[in-house]
């Protein structure tokens, strides 16, 4: 069959159009594939989770900010979860399950219940996630792949030594209120409590728990849930047991503010009660300057958080894990006692220096 020129030309044009359509289709497929492929290094390829006790405590607010800033720098996609209150274990468990399902490479966690959380975190590790404890060591501490934290025992010890030094000989007759975290006794609360009493010179008996001491100078152990309202209520209970309390330890600065309000309500805001605390946020350091808190041990959540993000990034890229500070079973991010009323033999920094280093 003979094909005329015009018909032949038409067939060539038809073939050309089909080829062009195939090329365009291929380009569209390639574009779609590129858009849906996992991002490579330098974008948001690595996913990580930060799980904190609450999202209202200034310490954890700043921890979140530090983690987010470092994640953005490293190209890590970071998801945030927090308990409704300090001690909200179930919300943290659900957050871990979400992180596993999302394909995250690692979890940064400040655990509310340092014992009960171990099993859910073991499940995360079994699914290939790196587990980093921040601020609060797990029990056992080896349940986390690494821990970035203040030496919480040292933080408490500095406060206890400072109070003892300020009281001098009167320390033998002190009346002490211990305002702790919560009844589950997470490690951070135990370490700070036992550190304070040890620094003060009291036999703590079993260092792995608080409340078993038999020293008559300890008037009460009350829990605060690490907030101002809890601190006020706890202090009121302690004053009912003995109105002559002259030393107060608090788990953190929000609890210290609540304790001070309770003291103020009964006319004991005249400097006759020494309050020592832990955290070192800007509001807490300002309370030291105002005389509400006598001294506070400053820790550095920004550093904890940024190091944790870096560790997950490294784990995702080459499977490496961070190393501990030599001689310790965790990475020590440092602590300094902040006060303008220095005590002989107790290292401290001034309020001015504390304000330069504070957070929140």
Image (cartoon, rainbow, N blue to C red):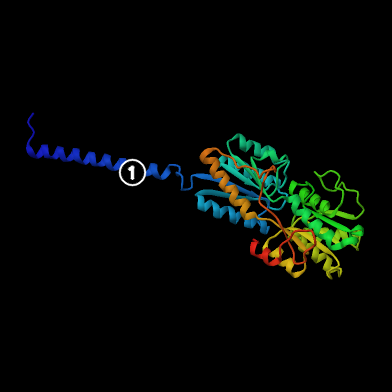
Q: Is residue 37 left or right of residue 332?
A: left
Q: Is residue 60 left or right of residue 218?
A: left
The answer to whether residue 172 is visible is yes
Q: Nearer the viewer, residue 135 or 105?
A: 135
Q: Nearer the viewer, residue 132 or 295?
A: 295
Residue at the image point whose x is 8% and y is 28% from the top: 1
Above or below residue 45? Residue 282 is below
Residue at the image point whose x is 78% and y is 50% from the top: 182
Q: Is residue 70 left or right of residue 151?
A: left
**Residue 98 placement (x, y as % from top left):** 59, 43
Q: Residue furthest top?
A: 1
**Residue 157 placement (x, y as % from top left):** 78, 53
Label 1 sits on residue: 28
Position of the C terminus by quadrant: bottom right
Q: Residues within 10 Å of mark 1 (few under 14, many from 20)?
A: few
The answer to whether residue 134 is visible is no
Numbered label tally: 1
Q: Quadrant of residue 259?
A: bottom right
**Residue 186 placement (x, y as % from top left):** 75, 46
Q: Nearer the viewer, residue 102 or 269?
A: 269
Q: Is residue 10 left or right of residue 167?
A: left
Above or below residue 70? Residue 96 is above
Residue at the image point whose x is 92% and y is 59% from the top: 173
Q: Nearer the viewer, residue 4 or 169?
A: 169
Q: Residue furthest front?
A: 345
Q: Quadrant of residue 146?
A: top right
**Residue 2 placement (x, y as % from top left):** 7, 31
Q: Quadrant of residue 244?
A: bottom right
Q: In what element is the residue under mark 1?
A: helix
């Amino acid at each position: 069959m003979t094909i005329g020129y015009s018909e032949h030309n038409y067939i060539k044009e038809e073939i050309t159009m089909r080829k062009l359509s195939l090329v365009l289709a291929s380009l569209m497929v390639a574009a779609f594939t590129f858009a849906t492929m996992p991002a490579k290094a330098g974008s948001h390829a690595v996913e990580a989770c930060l799980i904190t006790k609450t999202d209202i405590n200034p310490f954890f607010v700043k921890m979140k900010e530090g983690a987010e800033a470092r994640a953005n720098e490293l190209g890590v996609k970071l998801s945030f979860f927090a308990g409704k209150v300090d001690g909200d274990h179930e919300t943290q468990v659900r957050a871990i399950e979400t992180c596993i399902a999302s394909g995250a490479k690692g979890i940064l966690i400040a655990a509310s219940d340092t014992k009960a959380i171990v099993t859910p975190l073991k499940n995360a590790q079994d699914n290939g996630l790196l587990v980093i404890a921040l601020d609060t060591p797990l029990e056992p501490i080896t349940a986390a792949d690494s821990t970035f934290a203040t030496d919480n025992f040292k933080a408490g010890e500095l406060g206890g030594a400072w109070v003892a030094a300020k009281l001098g000989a009167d320390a033998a007759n002190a009346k002490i209120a211990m305002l702790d975290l919560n009844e589950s006794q997470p490690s951070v609360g135990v370490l700070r409590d036992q550190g304070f009493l040890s620094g003060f010179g009291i036999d703590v008996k079993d260092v792995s728990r608080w409340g078993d001491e038999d020293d008559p100078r300890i008037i009460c152990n009350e829990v605060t849930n690490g907030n101002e309202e809890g601190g006020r209520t706890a202090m009121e209970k302690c004053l009912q047991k003995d109105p002559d309390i002259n030393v107060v330890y608090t788990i953190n600065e929000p609890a210290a503010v609540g304790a001070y309000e309770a003291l103020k309500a009964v006319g004991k805001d005249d400097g006759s009660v020494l309050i020592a605390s832990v955290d070192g946020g800007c509001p807490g350091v300002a309370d030291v300057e105002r005389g509400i808190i006598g001294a506070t041990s400053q820790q550095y959540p920004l550093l904890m958080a940024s190091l944790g993000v870096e560790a997950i990034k490294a784990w995702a890229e080459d499977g490496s894990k961070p190393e501990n500070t030599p001689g310790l079973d965790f990475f020590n991010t440092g602590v300094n006692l902040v006060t303008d009323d220095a005590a002989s033999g107790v290292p401290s920094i001034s309020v001015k220096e504390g304000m330069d280093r504070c957070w929140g």
